Image (tube, helix red, strand yellow):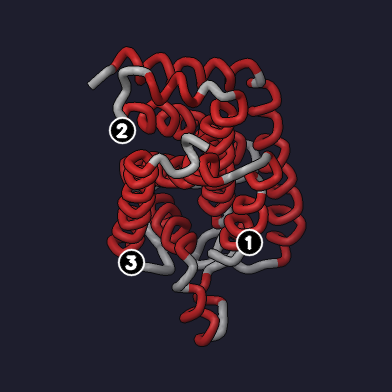
Amino acid sequence: MNLYGIRAIYIFEMRRFFKTLGQSILSPVLSTTLYFVVFGSAIGSAMVEIDGISYGAFIIPGLIMLALLSQSISNASFGIYFPRFTGTIYEILSAPLSPIEIVTGYVGAAATKSIFIGILILITARFFVDYDIQHPLWMFGFLVLTSVTFSLLGFLIGIWAEGFEKLQIVPLMVITPLAFLGGTFYSIDMLPPFWQTVTLFNPVVYLISGFRWSFYGVADVNVGISFGMTLLFLVLCTGIVIWIFRTGYKLRT
């Protein structure tokens, strides 16, 4: 394992993040604040508790997951797309680094950024509403697992994209709608039976449900199933990444 090479990629990506630290922090903090003002205060004051939890506290796990998904995909996709755009991808491919080491460097940096943002949103939420974390180890586990999984997905998008506009297609047209339809602001038990069944085909449901369980001990889906589905998606993304490096798909074109 070439730890020096992994460290070089990781540090380079983290330096790029810290160069725009103000912008990176300001955006999620402002977004979280607006969500709490609109949904937590204005709408939440007119809503009853959900599963015995105040509405403002109920939406915290969903908001963190919403930011985590978008940040993980964005960070990882831009991270690998820029070397392809500038041509430095050939230097990386010719370096004494295995595919797993290259992926570890880029995905590790993207996941670290997302975890940082997730914790920042968690701290920001404390200024607006009280909440408990009943299972902190599970909470951190879901946080890390989701960040790594969707950073891998972002890595795949960065390889697939042929231009900057395509980097935004999946996050805007797929991930964000799935997050909103996945129980970010409500429990899927509030839906009619037919739509509850349809919603179970949305992979984001399992992420949000498992993460919410780690906070309050309540979930729309069994936590074991949520954890298993997240692991399955991680394995799927890992398999596709391995195939890409073996075939050179989009890497040498």
Q: Position of residue 154 (x, y in %)?
A: 51, 43
Which residue, given by chain and number where applicable, does mark 2 sit on? 100
Q: Secondary structure at mark 2?
A: helix
Question: Is 27 above or below relative to 20?
Answer: below
Please state which amino acid type lies under the numbered disc 2. Ile
Amino acid at the residue labelled 3 = Asn
Residue behind mark 3: 222
Cα gap from disc 1 to disc 2, whole angstroms: 31 Å
Q: x%, y% of residue 238?
A: 34, 46
To which residue does mark 1 refer? 177
Q: State the image coordinates of residue 76 (x, y, percent, origin top left).
A: 51, 36
**Crowd class of label 3 (few under 14; some 14 to 19; many from 20; radius 10 Å):** few
* Mark sitting earlier along the chain (1/3): 1
Instruction: State the residue lying farthest toward the left.
Output: 1
Closer to the chain start, of discs 3 and 2, is 2
Q: Nearer the viewer, residue 145 or 14?
A: 14
Q: CA distance from mark 1 to mark 3?
A: 23 Å
Q: Which residue is pictured at 35% across the width and 16% down the height?
A: 5
